[in-house]
Image (cartoon, rainbow, N blue to C red):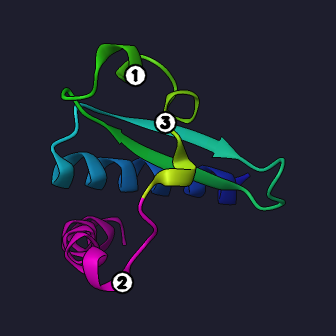
Amino acid sequence: MTDRIQYCLDTILVGDAVLAITGALRINYETLGNAEPALHTHIIPRFQSEPDVKRRKPPFSVYDWTTSRRFDPALDQPFIDKMRDWLQPHLAAES
């Protein structure tokens, strides 16, 4: 059970980081493990600029993920750096 508790705490911490660096209105969490045989969580920022009809519903039901931009190491490096910079002091404080 300790591992599951830590997983939840880590997920919340990552959500806090995404919230802080993206300026999102809120964060949606979706934890799955059925189709993919590994427990994983989607941490999805939701923005005030989204149309109400989309923002108020689960993101997987209103967005076409097949048309979204794929991860690009070069384009996504600034986001990765911001996440690392935000998380490092928070992780150090937990140690």
Q: What's under tag 3, amino acid-wise? A: Tyr
| Image location of residue 55, percent across then percent down | 36, 23
Residue at 64%, 44% in the rendered image: 31
As drawn, 28 above or below 17: above
Residue for badge 1:
54
Foreground: 10 or 30? 30
Q: Farthest residue toward the front?
A: 67
* SS for dot 1: helix
Mark 1 packing: few (<14 Cα in 10 Å), some, or many (20+)?
some
Residue for badge 3:
63
Which image quarter: residue 61? top right
Which image quarter: residue 48? top left
Q: What's under tag 2, amino acid-wise? A: Pro
Residue for badge 2:
73
Q: What's under tag 1, amino acid-wise? A: Lys
Query: Contact (CB < 8 A) between labels 3 and 1?
Result: yes
Magenta highlight range: 69-95
* SS for dot 3: loop
Q: Magenta: predominant secondary structure element? A: helix
| Image location of residue 78, percent across then percent down | 19, 75
